[in-house]
Image (cartoon, rainbow, N blue to C red):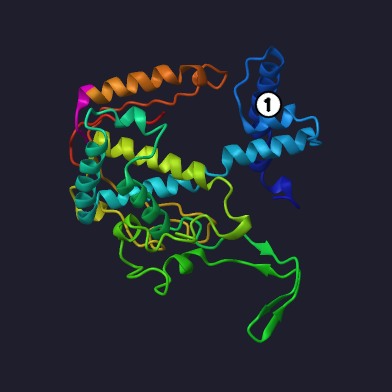
Amino acid sequence: MRILPSLNAQPNEYRERRDKYLSFLLNKLKKQIEEGSDKPCITGNILKDPEAKLNEMEIKSICLTMVSAGLDTVPGNLIMGIAYLSSEHGQEIQKRAYDEIMKVYPDGDAWEKCIIEEKVPYVTAFVREVLRFFTVIPICLPRTSIKDIKYEEAVIPAGTTFYMNAWAADFDESHFKSAHEFSIERYLDNPEGSGTPHYAYGAGSRMCAGSHLANRELYTAFIRLITAFHIDPPKEAKDRSILDALECNAIPTGLTTDPKPFKCGFRARDLASLERWMAESEERTKDLAASNFNQKLIHASSEPNARGIKTTAAVGF
């Protein structure tokens, strides 16, 4: 596509579309800074820093990284987490998770509080195990050594390209007992969580810079899903999810895991509360949607699910 772009027009179309929304958002931020109405953000800090010598393209590159870095990874973990919750073992996990959430939030305010705090260790442990078990980037991005490295009797010269097999590391029996079993308990008392708890984000100084954000996103999403819904298995066996970390990938040659389709059901635990939470979320995010993109962060559906049960699904914060 880079050498012979004329053979495929789509990359250029996607680039133009991307540049439009990046320019729109960046110009909007610059205007807000001038007016003094901006909210704290990474790009804003760069624009305000007199010592930051970044040109327009470099700033846009940072913006693009912030926007797109987790688009293929967090959804993969979220989908496979839902897939596991819909399994037979997942039914037990859901019950325990819901009970633990209710212990911390007996007044039913987990939906609101989970955005600002993380107080349910069982769900935190569940998120960690999802990240470990479903390593959505099985082979990490390449790294290049900057100096010679001595390994046993060999010397690996500077400039060598390395690929870390994150999937193999996450299923290393010398670090994770019964690594091929989905076990939340391995993280509850943190016996296997010290040091590098898993390799979903890579490891070392060049590991994913957005790992803390991804952790919070997944924690919030699962708290809300389990608080609002009971996730049921599909009616038919053929619609069950594939729970093998490699076999579940629809595109094995891709960089990230693209989960194969499956079905599951969502039963609202308390429809009145769910509708109230959705309305409150929509109110809180209405300013985000009031742009030229007219984005909708909240989507409600009352179509029959895989078990023929009418449900209402909510997405958004």
- The quarter holding residue 116 reads top left
Check disc 1: other Cα within 10 Å, few if <14, some if 14-19, many if 20+.
some
Left-right relation of 280 to 266 = right
Q: Seen from this angle, which residue lies furthest top?
A: 35
Q: What stretch is highlighted in magenta?
A: 267-272
Q: Mark 1 = which residue?
A: 26
- Determine the residue positioned at 45% across, 52% down: 258
Q: Position of residue 284 (x, y in %)?
A: 43, 19
Quadrant assignment, res 42: top right
Closer to the camera in the image, 211 or 21: 211
Which residue does the image show at 34% across and 19% down from the upper left?
A: 279
Which residue is at the far bottom?
Answer: 153
As drawn, 94 above or below 23: below
Does residue 23 lie above or below 132 as drawn? above
From what the image shows, is residue 205 above or below residue 293? below
Numbered disc total: 1
